[in-house]
Image (tube, rainbow, N blue to C red):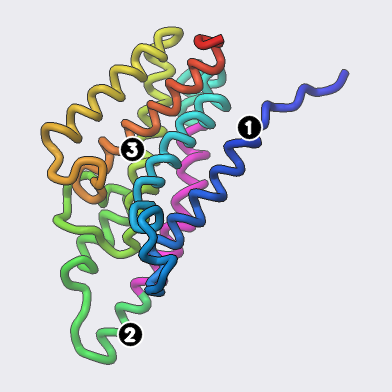
Amino acid sequence: MAVPQPHRFQALDGWRGICALLIALHHFPAHGAIYHLSIVRHAWILVDFFFVLSGFVIAHAYRERLSTREDAKAFAIRRFFRLWPLHVAVLAGFIALELYRIAATGTGFVGARSVFAIFTNVTLIQSLGLHDRLTWNTPAWAVSTEFWTTLLFALMVLAAGRARAWVSGILVVGAVAVLTAVSRYGMRETFDWGIARCIYGFFLGALAYEAWARNWFA
């Protein structure tokens, strides 16, 4: 008997590439006509596309596979080792550069590159309101928030069961409320309430998958 192949969302693969290139252009410090295009200068918002995409894809892959604590534990371990090793390897590179900076100038490990920030980055908690700025490998704020958000997703699936669409909607509304009422930066949150921004996008993606899988808009 042939093994059924998992559904492949080819359109999402294409958009992933387009959005990744635009984000790279947004951060690439080569001033010129392309750099100053409005779509490039505002491409930071496409980080939220990746949060939504993660919610959609992970809901597709795991919403029926997380039925026990053992399933959730295996899921958490898999997500950790998918994100943490590369994150720490890049962090180690930045620490090596900071050591060189001390050797060359006599100063280092202050401000955004403090020793405390090494601890928060290693433990993936650097975007939970513990700093007043982005630290070390600055884009890694999204890695840290997505890790904790995926764990929240696993707990939600275990606890909510068939009501997961409703719970996803509640989490989206709650995250928007935080970004609106508490956050100083709104949708540009990173180091402070970045977790709320990630929860908003991720569970919006999970909710979109529920709508697609249940054929709500046939």
Q: Residue 153: x percent and y percent? A: 40, 26
181 w.r.t. 92: above or below: above
* Residue identifier under label 1: 9
Q: Secondary structure at mark 1?
A: loop
Toward the bottom, the furthest residue is: 104
Sequence order check: which comes first, mark 3 or mark 1? Answer: 1
Toward the right, the furthest residue is: 1
Residue at image position (21%, 66%) is 112
Amino acid type of the residue tagged 3 in the rendering: Cys
Sequence order check: which comes first, mark 3 or mark 2? Answer: 2
* Residue identifier under label 3: 198
Q: Nearer the viewer, mark 3 or mark 1?
A: 1
Q: Residues in magenta?
A: 75-95
Q: Residue 129: x percent and y percent? A: 17, 46
Q: Nearer the viewer, mark 3 or mark 2?
A: 3
27 w.r.t. 130: above or below: below
Q: Nearer the viewer, residue 41 or 128?
A: 41
Q: Secondary structure at mark 3?
A: helix
Instruction: Give the label on residue 100, or none.
Output: 2
